[in-house]
Image (cartoon, rainbow, N blue to C red):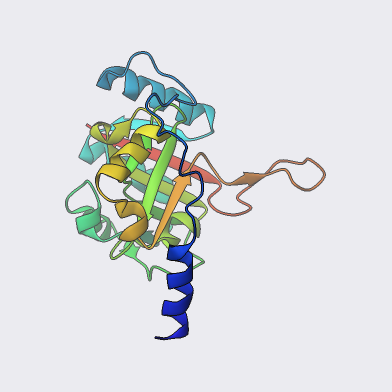
Amino acid sequence: MGAREQILGKLRATRQPFADVAPIEDRRRMIPMEDLSPAERLRRFISEAEALGCFVYQVTSNEAVEQIMELIDEDKTVLCWDEAELPMDGLQGMLESLGVAVDRHDDGDTRVGITGVTAALAATGSLIVESGAGRYRSTSLLPDVHIALMRAEQILPDLESWEEAQRRDDYPAFRRASNTTIVSGPSKTADIAHQLVKGAHGPREVHVMILV
């Protein structure tokens, strides 16, 4: 038996903490929502995301391309998730036809990054972004401008709802994703002299495009 097996064996043999604590049957939401309808989840998500400083658009695929090109401006390259990981077919081809190439996913000089999302949270206006094959974590963290593409069906009521779904599916965001990030607005900090600085640890701007 190796050292690893010995250590794990000792850990498994120890008395389990809190074994006498009854399971929680009625979990309380940190931010309760009375109306959980899809329409209200959409309305609440947009309101909360905009309050965090995000720019939110409800657009068709063609309108999304127009808006993306406006944000790209005069840039010639973007960072982008693989086609199969985006909720929009043919985006990279459309960008290339307009003179915009997809750059190497770890290029720190590229200004705009385009991703999908795993889920969105209505109660807080947050995005959940899971990294993995074809879903590069650098795409949402390195560029100054993060464009997140999603559909309204991906909006969950709150973080607790997402955690419940994770538990049912054996926690794919932690077992199968290389990294899971909860994005709540642009990156910002006020650690130094209480002066608010945007873009300290990530994008200065977050643009959420809800495809209709």
Q: Considering depth in this image, is 109 or 202 the residue closer to the camera? A: 202
Q: Residue furthest bottom?
A: 2
Q: Residue furthest left?
A: 89
The answer to whether residue 125 shows anywhere in this view is yes
Residue name at image x 26 percent, y 43 percent:
168
Residue name at image x 33 percent, y 46 percent:
117
Query: Vertical placement of 115 versus 127: above or below?
Result: below
**Residue 165: x %, y % from top left:** 29, 40
Query: Vertical placement of 34 versus 207: above or below?
Result: above
Q: Residue furthest top?
A: 34
The answer to whether residue 73 shows anywhere in this view is no
Residue name at image x 24 percent, y 47 percent:
169
Query: Vertical placement of 182 versus 154: above or below?
Result: below
Q: Considering depth in this image, is 185 or 1 the residue closer to the camera? A: 1
**Residue 143: x %, y % from top left:** 49, 57
Check the picture and name the quadrant holding the C terminus: top left
Q: Considering depth in this image, is 145 or 18 the residue closer to the camera? A: 18
Check the picture and name the quadrant holding the N terminus: bottom left
Q: Considering depth in this image, is 106 or 191 the residue closer to the camera? A: 191
**Residue 69: x %, y % from top left:** 35, 48
Residue name at image x 48 percent, y 70 percent:
10
